Amino acid sequence: MHFEPFLSLKVTVGPAVEVGATPCGLRRVIPILGGEGSLASGEAFKVLPVGADFQLLVQENGAYTTAQLDARYVLELTSGERIYVHNTALRHADAAATQALLRGEPVTADKVYFRCQPRFETATPRLQWLHTRQFVGQGVRLPDRVELDFFVVV
């Protein structure tokens, strides 16, 4: 088993819509405003301004340190073909780094564990193989965007 690059993208996000502290944790919704990226083949795409990242932050020892992420959005290739993305992720950092992220401040990638499991759906015949493979990824959260690299498990 090994990993091959599949795509890299930058997703522009809006301010968090705070639902509040529920019995499950701190619930937030992050609007997806757009973005761009490219497949490993070099084919470019844009992230359409639809979708959101539904977040649940959970406490450890009285502080928020772990975020369970559930993002759903659409990629549009330069050919006009579209790919629906459903990406679940785990982001963990110490309490100080997590609070900085919540305030919209930059935190260096080495202070945050951010791994994901994207799934894809498409009607595009040449990309039907996406439905029969597993993918993993890693991300970096910046104040106005999320940068992600996805890999196919071979």
Image (tube, grey):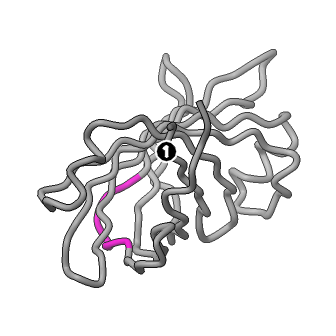
Read off the magenta span.
47-52
**How far from the left and from the top, in percent, is residue 28?**
48, 44
- Secondary element under disc 1, as helix, strand or loop, is strand
User: Magenta stretch: residue 50 in it?
Assistant: yes
Tell me the quarter of the picture where residue 84 sits: bottom left
Q: What residue is rendered at 43% in x and 39% in y?
A: 70
Tell me, yes or no, if residue 20 can be seen here. Answer: no
- Seen at 54% across and 37% down, the residue is 89
Instruction: Please state which of residues 22 and 153 is positioned toward the viewer in this rendering.
Output: 153
Above or below residue 96? Residue 51 is below
Q: Answer above or below: position of 11 versus 43.
A: above
The residue closer to the viewer here, 123 or 86, is: 123
Residue at x 61% of width, y 37% of height: 2
Looking at this view, name the residue that lies furthest to the bottom.
78
The N terminus: image quadrant: top right
Type of amino acid at the residue the image marks with label 1: Val
- 7 vs 102, nearest the viewer: 7
Does residue 61 appear left or right of residue 36 in this picture? right
Q: Is residue 74 left or right of residue 10?
A: left
* Residue 47 in the image: above or below residue 6: below
In the image, taking residue 103 as reference, residue 132 lies left or right, namely left
Q: Is residue 15 visible?
A: yes
- The residue wearing badge 1 is 152
